[in-house]
Amino acid sequence: MCDFQVDFTAKPDGFELPEESFGKANLLLKTLLDEGIVTWRGDVLSVNTQHRFLVRTVASCFDAYLGEAGRTH
């Protein structure tokens, strides 16, 4: 996500994104897709140029701990 995109087929060895996190992520990503903030092209999720300031919001869709404890700040 440091490059404002993530290729879900290119992951580091030993890194697995738990499947259950996709359920939560899909709900949040649908909103971001509908608003034009992100786009899907094949297996690549990209943050659109004019919305790059929201990259942390996009990344939070995949944060397994964020929803469990609620807001921390």
Image (spheres, rainbow, N blue to C red):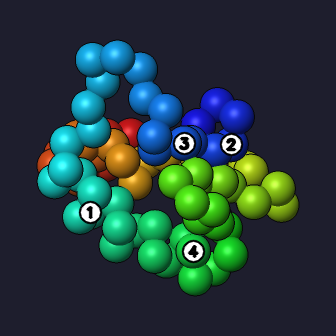
Mark 3 and mark 4: span between their CA atoms? 16 Å
The 10 Å Cα crowd at callout 4, few under 14, some 14 to 19, many 20 or more, is some
Residue 47 position by quadrant: bottom right
Is 57 situated left or right of 5 in this image?
Answer: left
Q: Which mark is residue 33?
A: 4
Mark 1 and mark 3: span between their CA atoms? 19 Å
Q: Which mark is residue 4?
A: 2
Tell which tag, 1 or 3, sits nearer the viewer. 3
Is 1 situated left or right of 66 in this image?
Answer: right
Q: Which mark is residue 24?
A: 1
Tell which tag, 2 or 3, sits nearer the viewer. 3
Is 30 situated left or right of 26 in this image?
Answer: right
Residue type, label 4? Leu
Q: For the residue labelled by badge 2, is the local secondary structure a helix, a strand or a loop? A: loop
Q: Earlier in the sequence, mark 3 or mark 4?
A: 3
Q: Residue at x 46, y 67 (%)?
A: 29
Residue type, label 1? Lys
Residue type, label 3? Asp
Q: Earlier in the sequence, mark 1 or mark 3?
A: 3
Mark 4 and mark 1: span between their CA atoms? 14 Å
The 10 Å Cα crowd at callout 3, few under 14, some 14 to 19, many 20 or more, is some
Residue type, label 2? Phe
Q: Earlier in the sequence, mark 4 or mark 1?
A: 1
- Compared to 41, does 2 lie above or below? above
